[in-house]
Image (cartoon, rainbow, N blue to C red):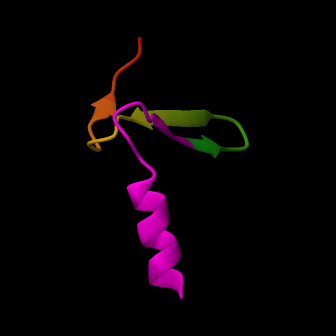
């Protein structure tokens, strides 16, 4: 079942987890990082 897999992934996130999202574009690349609460981490 898809929902069981999704729930297992969500439950695996702890306060030591950093979630990264990367968009590799043709010219410009973007990355964003979020902590375990879903709050964006601003790295400068």
- Residue 43: which quarter of the image? top left
**Is residue 42 positioned above or below 18 on the image?**
above
Q: Position of residue 14 (x, y in %)?
A: 38, 41
- Is residue 44 rendered to the left or right of residue 38? right
In the rendered structure, which segment of residues is drawn in magenta?
A: 1-21
Along the viewing direction, whichever of 19 and 43 lies nearer the viewer: 19
**Is residue 37 positioned above or below 4 on the image?**
above
Name the outermost residue toward the top.
44
* Quadrant occupied by the C terminus: top left
User: What is the total number of numbered labels drawn onto the structure image?
Assistant: 0
Name the outermost residue toward the bottom.
1
Q: Position of residue 32 (x, y in %)?
A: 46, 35
- Is residue 20 rendered to the left or right of residue 37? right
Q: Position of residue 42 (x, y in %)?
A: 34, 22
5 part of magenta stretch:
yes
Looking at the image, which residue is at 55% across and 35% down?
30
Looking at the image, which residue is at 58% across and 41% down?
22
- Residue 37: which quarter of the image? top left
33 part of magenta stretch:
no
* Quadrant occupied by the N terminus: bottom right
**Is residue 43 positioned above or below 11 on the image?**
above
- Residue 16: which quarter of the image? top left
Looking at the image, which residue is at 62% across and 35% down?
29
Along the viewing direction, whichever of 18 and 28 lies nearer the viewer: 18
């Amino acid at each position: 079942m898809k929902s069981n897999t999704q729930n297992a992934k969500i439950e695996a996130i702890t306060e030591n987890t950093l979630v990264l999202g990367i968009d590799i574009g043709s010219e410009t690349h973007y990355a964003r990082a979020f902590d375990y609460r879903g709050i964006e981490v601003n790295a400068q």
